[in-house]
Amino acid sequence: MSRTRVVAAIGHALPWAIAVAYFFAAPSDLEFGTQVMIWILFAISLDLTLGYAGILTLGQAAFFGLGAYIAGLFALHVCADPILGHFAAIGVAALFGALTGAMILHTSGVTLLMLTLAIVSMLSQYANRATDLTGGDNGLLGIRLDPIFGVFEFNIFGKTAYVYALVVLFGWFVLAWRIVHSPFGRSLDGIRQNPHRMRAIGTPVWWRLLAIYAISAAMAGSAGALSAHATRFVGLSVLDLLTSGSVTVALILGGTRRLYGGFIGATIYLVVQDYSAKINPFFWEFVVGGLLIATVLLLERGLLDLGPAVLRLRDRWRAGQRK
Amino acid sequence: MLSFGLTVLLDGISYGMILYLISVGLTVTMGLMRVVNLAHGAFAMIGGYVAGFLTQRGCNFYLAALGAAAAAAAIGAATERTIYRPLYRKGELAQVLLTVGFVFVATGAVSEVFGAFPYPVVFPAYLTRPIDIGFREYPAYRLFLIASGAVIALLLWLILDNSLFGARLRAAVDNPRMARAVGINVSLLFTATFVVGCGLAGLGGALGSGILSLEPAYALKYVVLFLVVVIVGGEGSFEGSFVAAMALGVIDTLGKYFVAEAAPYLLYTAAFALLLWRPKGLVPPRSLT
Amino acid sequence: MGCLLAIITAAMVLLWAGRAPADVLKVGLLADFTGAFATWGPQFQMGVEAYQALHGKTVKGPDDKPHEIQFIYRDTASQGPDKARQLAQELVLRDHVKFLCGLDLSPHAMALADISKEAKVPVVIMNAATSSITRMSPYFVRVSQTVPQDVAPLGPWAVAHGINRVYTIVSDYAPGYDAEAYLTKTFKAAGGTIVGSGRTPQQETNFSAYMERVLEANPDALYMFQPAGSPSVAFVRAYVERGLKAAGIKLLGGGETQELFLPNFTDDIIGTVTSFHYTETNTRPANLELRQQVKKMSGDRAVPDIATLAAWDGTRLIEDAVAALGADADGLKYIDFMKGKKFDSPRGPVEIDPVERDIIQNVYIRQVEKGNGTLVNIDIDEVKMVKDPWKVDNPPKSN
């Protein structure tokens, strides 16, 4: 095998190897690892719309939250089987994505941004008021889940939740990878860069956008379901504007249009947030804000670009030396 | 019944005036510089805190309000060169993120310096009492807001329609390339307008602190509100943001009176519907490109 | 000479070795240090540190082994209960805490029910005021208050003092509903009429519309329940601005006028009557001790509030429990120890209900007045040893 292929193969295997190693290396911290994986999935879902298709959205939390509540309500009122609940969540989220997408995807830019904000805000308000359904501020309490396949049960040690999240993440990742590297995915790239030109060559732009929006919604809904299952709790924060903003930050931190950017961004965001909150509870706003500003100003393509950015700097320095 | 209707109208308009004061700077930033500035609320917040700081130490209210505007304008000038300049070319998403980062930093700074409690601006006693307006007693404060908002709106309109600066500004908003081609120094215009916009926001934050209370979460809490006013009104449109601010102020107040349970929804549903109906805003800027 | 030196050295070494190292017992305190509820965390911390400064951080267990009680603070950042749950889980699994405490918001406390049972860790609740919480887990004990407990005595007091028509406006969340329900219940039971009620969105600061409705209904008094901070300040401002005070409508409330928040109000708040379980300026010895220690540690501008108070009492309970049972007792044993305990808190005499594990305490009726140039709450009445009325109305279902 050529060297580049070996490097690529190692690069691909690395995140998964780390995830598996973590399971054995940090048995008392599995919940954190599960959270990271849920957020990676969430970030990747956003990458498909925001990164690849260029749909400016701050409302991704709508699908995440919807997925979480459906999964929770399903377990409470219909059936405690987590797999069925998960599929229900994905289905509802995808449907909602398709419906709202159909209503707003003909707009673009800041108008589209505002519309997505309005949608997630309305959903959030609704959840807040419908306390009989959602538990309101207290959230959905007392969720009991059947063990997966009747064997693997959920408890505070979180082993089942971790493996479950890992498997789901892997499945979606493979799907996202195939989509992005397909002709459909390429057309999304083109749409992002110049929708008019794409229309001119006959691409059904609106339908493609709707399709990716619905897929992304399904993925985010799946992440939400994982969240509900892993913590056996659903609170209003899943529909919060802050949640939407945070996942956007995490994605940008890592770098859009790389899929693996989501891995890096989500991990770093959660780790930094956790760590700076522990150092000084007042401090984390500064750190997160500063990180955001620095990333945007200095690293165009996110932290995943750090390597190439350093290499570029090195090349420029060498070129300067040669003069 | 008439009295009730008039009261609601006055309440809605006074609220709308504050929204206008704060958002007018944002509409120019977004329309002229095409920068999505989610940190605009932070300027209003800073202005409010400065006014609070000054009035709590006995400073005259009107001087403090001017101080608020000046402080916000100064910070605007400083950040325009350092943080916003690089953003012009970077695309909407980068702008959203960077300005959100700025909001976080501002929120953290305000918490540290002024504490987490609500921070009061001390109004002169005559503004805290109701006065007789014929058919009922009505808070003097709200009348003051309506009056000052109207005066500033009038001033802005006069400047825009009757001065060279105003003409240049409108030209630059309509068609920046053409404006540059005829020799208008668009980047100086950017800076000047941005600074004035921030100053107005600071003033709005100070004057409006009786309705929009000052606290560290201010910038994040109200940013959606200001954005809605700007986008619904049409970016870059002064008349649009005035109309949108009034409309949203009245709708929100009406909502609170009649359908209190649905009140929070009302704003977003109204914005959603208005945007679908008029994606470019209620009064879109006339543009040739 | 060398011999003497050797003996002295040996003696010193033996004395030093005999000094058993204190082992550390960790207590996790979860509260909001940032965000909308950012005042709770620091106020809790102040109470804990004041108590430990005065009474020591180390207690001797029943076997005379010293145990250092170390508090670990975690910020729930005014976010949802999932954050509280996550932090609690980490504290239990990673930091191996023996107790959890703090919890300013009810949803945060509720989210800990499952963890407390699975990990068998006692939770000393220092604020969360929803009545049903202590029933959610046998590991929950509360040292603060419940909303119905604070509110219920105001109804009969109002009727006894000439207030027959009341309009209630509460904030739209669970504590608000509790306040509305119990004021209405006790006020009506004493013969009063509720002429209207309203619920305002949480964190609302624009009350003009609601005040208009109150003016129309023309009650004797307006009852408010707003979270401390900008909503309560804005509420009182609107009450004055809209002419309600001038029209003779009295203002009734609860925790809005705590000493910590009084500086945010203008003199317009004078005359407001509130019912609450802690009047900060009381002269009981335990309170004077608390106030003095707080001033010493945090300066003259520091003011203790119900968070400081509850943290003080909670720390006391935890330290007493460890002193009685050592550092390795079973969670339920610590809870059993705390049940039925009576002691003198800075607020007055208190008791931990042996069945419900909730607090039984005095509730004071106070009025805001101006004393020595500052606004202050003055006790005008007292209701002794009030049990949480919700629990009385809803006896536990027999298992």
Image (cartoon, coloured by chain):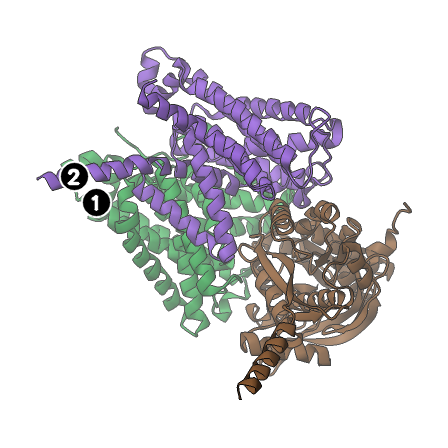
Q: Does the rendering let one see residue A55?
A: no
Q: Which x, y percent locates residue A127? A: 63, 38
Is C111 placed left or right of B210 in the picture?
right
Q: Which chain is purple?
A: A
Q: Quadrant of residue A300?
A: top left
Q: Quadrant of residue A165?
A: top right
Real-space Cα separation, disc 2 to disc 1, in angstroms? 35 Å
Residue B205 horizontal side relative to residue C16, left or right: left
**Which residue corresponds to mark 1?**
B187
Q: With respect to residue C70, does A124 lie above or below?
A: above
- Residue C335 location, x and y as percent? 79, 58
Chain C colour? brown
Residue highlighted by disc 2: A318
Can residue C309 be seen in this snapshot?
yes
Q: Quadrant of the C terminus of chain C?
A: top right
Mark 2: give few (<14), some (14-19) or many (20+) Cα within 10 Å. Answer: few
Q: Residue at x 72, y 74 (%)?
A: C346
Display colour for chain B: green
Farthest-out residue, bottom: C1
* Residue type pointed to by label 1: Ser
Identify the chain of the residue marked 2, using the numbered disc in the image.
Answer: A
Secondary structure of residue under mark 1: helix
Categorize mark 1 by other alpha carbons within 10 Å: few (<14), some (14-19), many (20+): some
C362 or A155, nearer to the observer: A155
